């Protein structure tokens, strides 16, 4: 079994930091969001709960490969 790389540890820390920062950001909006109709609140929280995943794909790719890009040069 191989030892995890430093990149893996850094990536895990960055993922956890992303989650904490995103949760704090969304929670800071609670005063404003609380006045909205309940269905609008539900839609907002659903969207915000999905949007934080977008930066994960390049971050996970970086953890696995060391590159943020998918490795394709765009040439056929």
Image (spheres, rainbow, N blue to C red):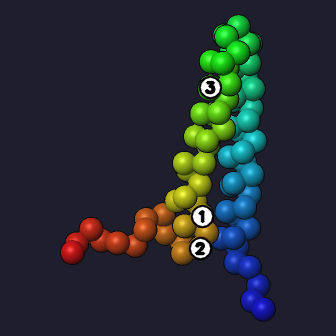
Which numbered marker is on residue 44? 3
Q: Check contact, mark 1 vs mark 3: CB within 8 A.
A: no
State the image coordinates of residue 35 (x, y, percent, origin top left): 70, 7
Q: Quadrant of the C terminus?
A: bottom left
Q: Quadrant of the N terminus?
A: bottom right
Q: Check contact, mark 1 vs mark 2: CB within 8 A.
A: yes
Which numbered marker is on residue 64? 2
Left or right relative to 52: residue 68? left
Which numbered marker is on residue 60? 1
Q: Residue at x 61, y 41 (%)?
A: 50
Q: Can you name the residue that lies furthest to the bottom here?
A: 1
Compared to 50, does 26 lie above or below? above
Left or right relative to 69: residue 29? right
Point out the tag, 2 or 3, that comes first from the N-terminus. Answer: 3
Near mark 1 (Cα within 10 A), the count class, few <14, some 14-19 or many ≥20, is some
Quadrant housing residue 62:
bottom right
State the image coordinates of residue 52 (x, y, percent, origin top left): 61, 43
Q: What is the spatial separation of the Cα atoms under label 2 and label 3, in whole angstroms?
A: 32 Å
| Disc 2, SS | helix
The residue closer to the viewer here, 30 or 17, is 30
Asked whether residue 32 appears in the rendered view, the answer is no
State the image coordinates of residue 71 (x, y, percent, origin top left): 40, 73
Quadrant housing residue 13:
bottom right
Q: Residue at x 62, y 25 (%)?
A: 44
Q: Of the residues tagged 2 and 3, which is closer to the observer?
A: 3
């Amino acid at each position: 079994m191989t030892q995890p790389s430093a990149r893996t540890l850094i990536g895990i820390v960055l993922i956890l930091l992303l989650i904490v920062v995103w949760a704090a950001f969304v929670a800071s909006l609670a005063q404003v969001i609380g006045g909205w109709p309940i269905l609008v609140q539900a839609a907002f929280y659903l969207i915000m709960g999905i949007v934080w995943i977008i930066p994960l794909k390049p971050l996970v790719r970086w953890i696995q490969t060391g590159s943020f890009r998918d490795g394709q040069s765009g040439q056929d």
